[in-house]
Image (cartoon, grey):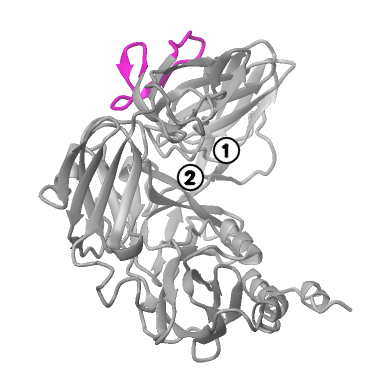
Amino acid sequence: MHPLLPLLNRRLRPPILIAALLVALLSTHQAIAQDNPQDTTAAPGYSVRGTVVNAISGQPIARALVSLDQDYAMLTGSGGEFSFDNVPANQYSVSVQKPGYQGFGAPMAGMAMHLAMRHVQTAPPRRIEVGPDMPALTFRIEPLAMISGHVTLSTADPADGIRVQVFSRQFQNGRASWTVAGEATTRSDGSFRIPDLLAGSYMVSTQASLDRPGSPTNDHAPVWGYPALYYPGVTELSAAGVIAVTAGQQAEADLTVTRQQFFPVTALLHSDDSPANFDIIDSGGRPTGIPARYDRREGVVHASVPSGAWSMEAHAYGRTQQWGRTDFQVNGAPVTFAIGILPIPRIPVVIHRDFVTNTDASQPASTGPGMNLFLVPADGLGLGRAGGGLDQDGDTEWLNISQPGRYWVEAQPFPPTYISSITSGGTDLGSNPLIIIPGSDSPPIEVTLRNDAGTISGQIAGQTATTPDTPGASGELPRVWIYAIPLFSTAGNLPEGSTQSAGQFTIPNLAPGSYRVVACDSPQEIDFHSTEALAAWAGKGQTITVDPGGTASVELEILHTTAAAQ
């Protein structure tokens, strides 16, 4: 019998199952990596030894997965120790993973699946130089946090089966947004726990729950239930509390929801009878989970909604995507309104290539769009319902859109080009949102690509080939994050780089303009679109100008930072 079968047949919790599977997989992986006969003509190898510890408590971590370039891998012992023998001299990427911790580097397949299910992001890998006089290594990984709590019903009934969601504040293309970080369903005693959270800022909310199960009807029987609620007990997103969670912390978020009457809401549908889905949306743009039923025979939508300000959204998927939305108010009585469904406009993307003469024959002529576009919600929680990406229809590129709204455009040109300008109807999309209105003809997005990008070449002060603690000496290589903060409006990503040998770095494919270049000892979240946020970086690093096709040189001192600059 295969050694994995007993593991698969047991009813194990996911972290235990992942660890068990990794043990079985590693028994084979290590044999390949370390037990094969060595080529006697090969260069001598060296021992790589070290310990994995808890970054908060300093305690050793057992059964953490340590790998070098995915070629050498093992689980740490009871004292957090690991060792690899006969490792050829070279630079290696080190990955460390452990359920319940924020690891770093590329996880193996089983661990990657577990992390994806938990919405956990790993940090970049560490780099080491293997050679003579290899010192013992110490890798510190932070324990993940948890938000737990109790949901209490005003009726003192069991609060089981209520859905709880956690939203995390993250940065996308330099702008803060809220995304779903985890969810759980309350147990019979009303308790819930949402584990595996990174240190950061969070909001907690429940979804609506009706006393009467099933779809809403248009009969006259009163409907009661519990409305959606944000911690610490408010219905408006603008009043929601933000919970700051540190590494390894267990934060509490208790909620008491009050039983209320849900009043009949009837929406008269104006459409071409395409199949449609309907959602009740709260003031923050979040689906509440309140069921809505479409009666095709009558052409109406039925729902039961508590008092407050709401919206109904319709999504139809026929020959074309269609969308509709109506805002409405419930004040302790039934409400009737109309909702129309209109086509979501298709926006053509016109790409101009203002290229200088390409004298490099190794670079083929561009046959595709040479770039991609993504949409980031400019209002509300967003919840990733923006869409984006380009589709070609005939000779025209079209921007994919899942629903109308206000969106920041994120442009990603393919090297070696950059975005010289991006506009729509004369509006600069580098500093203004794209507004998509259903049923309208939107002007095309005009993009100009150029291929005379500039480069920043730099050196970290004090790090040279002869410096003892930099490459050339064995051990962990210093980690430095380089950011070129654009001091002009742009729809592009924040240019980043990292140090190479001897503390050197290069950031290529830059749009010409002024940049503030900084070197940090920890990763940063930089809102480079905000004047207020950029003020925090005033006087730090160096400000330089990148000319078309030119190279700007800088020498930087490392900024010692302990938290992301906001």
Find the distance from the CA under tag 2 to the CA under tag 1: 9 Å
Left/right placement of residue 293 relative to residue 183 reads right
Residue 179: image location, x then y, percent = 45, 46
Give the position of the N terminus as an image quadrant: bottom right
Q: Are marks 2 and 1 in contact (CB under 8 Å)?
A: yes
**Identity, as a three-letter code, of the amino acid under mark 2:** Ala
Please check the rendered image and state whether residue 424 is part of the magenta-colored stretch, yes or no.
yes
Q: Is residue 208 above or below residue 16?
A: above
Q: Residues within 10 Å of mark 1 (few under 14, many from 20)?
A: many
Q: Quadrant of residue 139?
A: bottom left
Q: Nearer the viewer, residue 261 or 386?
A: 386
Q: Which residues are magenta?
A: 423-444
Helix, strand or loop for disc 1: loop
The residue positioned farthest toward the right in the image shown: 1
The residue positioned farthest toward the bottom in the image shown: 79
**Residue at the (68%, 36%) spot, across then down:** 215
The residue positioned farthest toward the top in the image shown: 441
First-in-chain label (2 vs 1): 2
Residue 564: image location, x then y, percent = 28, 57
Q: Main secondary structure of the magenta part?
A: loop
Q: Which residue is mark 1?
A: 290
Please check the rendered image and state whether residue 488 is part of the magenta-colored stretch, yes or no.
no
Q: Quadrant of residue 176?
A: top left
Q: Which residue is mark 2?
A: 228
Q: Nearer the viewer, residue 325 or 46?
A: 46
